[in-house]
Image (spheres, rainbow, N blue to C red):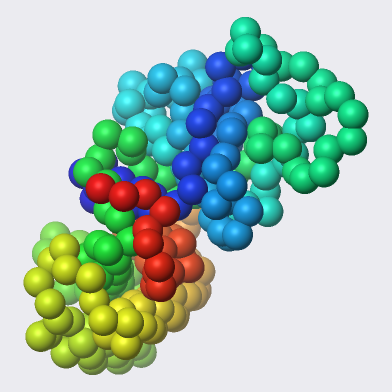
Amino acid sequence: MTSTWNWAAPLPTGVPGTDWTGTPAARPVSGGYTLSGHWRLPSAADAMPWVALPLADGRRSSAGTDAEQNGPDLFVVPAKNLLTTGRLPSSRGDSRPASGPVSRPADVYAVVDVYVPVGFSTYTTGKPLYASDAAFHWTAIAALALGAARRMTDALAGSTPGTTPPHPAAAADGQAAELAAVLHDERLSLAATVHGLPTARHVLPQVLEARLAQQVRQVAIVVRHVLAEVYQQVLSVDTMGDRHDLVSIIETSSPILQHALFAGEMLPPVDSTPLRKR
């Protein structure tokens, strides 16, 4: 999804620095990336809780595998993690100290070793999803999150073909069945909300958009509950030092769950013109 769609398109997007001290770079770490560099940001960023920071020319740290080298090049971070540099670029493209008092914050910002989860990264080459595409984006990520959670409950019950039940006790099977039932109800609720909405690429009426946004937030809460219950089961099983079967499912699902939890906050309903037009 993140390679096909640039879901960060509606957010204020920085212009990356190009000097040797401020050229952005992302270093792969466990579960995500650490991001550093300088960016110029539009004035609209002042009122937004999230900003999108692209890499310059796809620059990445030399560390990591080929897959990581070809990974995301656009990262979404909380605006509160930005640091005003107090330095303005000269006409030559380098930096110089700002002279005299500054009446407002400088528009050049720095990020230093900020951790960005995988679920908060995407690709500048992806097809932009603008604010008017919120219904599609929210529905897609909610459906993916429900599917990821269902994989966990299937594995917990040992119903996935070719796997061994991670917890043979009947209590674990009962817990898995209960969680699966909750997910089923949530799926039906999401389907009922989506049913009858205008076709894709049509802006929803505000009341319908708010209803869908709330439904997606509810999905994220339910999926997070399922994750917590499954993880508790993982911790309760003695695997004699071996890796639990569910761990890999949780790890591969993490980007989806991260994105689903904060999708409503990153792309809130828009009451006015999108920040970026088609």
User: Can residue 38 be seen from the camera position used here?
Assistant: yes
The front one of 10 and 262 is 10
Left or right, residue 195 beside residue 95:
left
x, y percent for residue 180:
25, 84
Q: Where is residue 69 in the image (x, y as percent from the top left)?
A: 38, 24
- 182 and 128: which is toward the camera: 128
Residue most extreme to the right? 100
- Against 246, residue 278 (above or below) is above
Left or right for 87, reference 48: right
Left or right for 93, reference 67 = right
Image position, residue 145 (x, y; %) = 30, 68
Which residue appears at 68% of the width and 15% of the height? 90
At a point 25% along the width and 62% down the height, the residue shown is: 133
Residue 80 spot, x, y in % from top left: 68, 53
Q: Quadrant of residue 189?
A: bottom left
Q: Is residue 58 positioned above or below 114 on the image?
A: above
Image-based side of 27 in relation to 4, left or right: right
Mark yes or no: residue 183 visible. Answer: no
Q: Which of 142 and 31 is in front in this view?
A: 142
**Measuring 37% from the left and 62% from the top, which residue is drawn there?**
273
Reply above or below: 247 against 102.
Answer: below
Quadrant for residue 225, please give it: bottom left
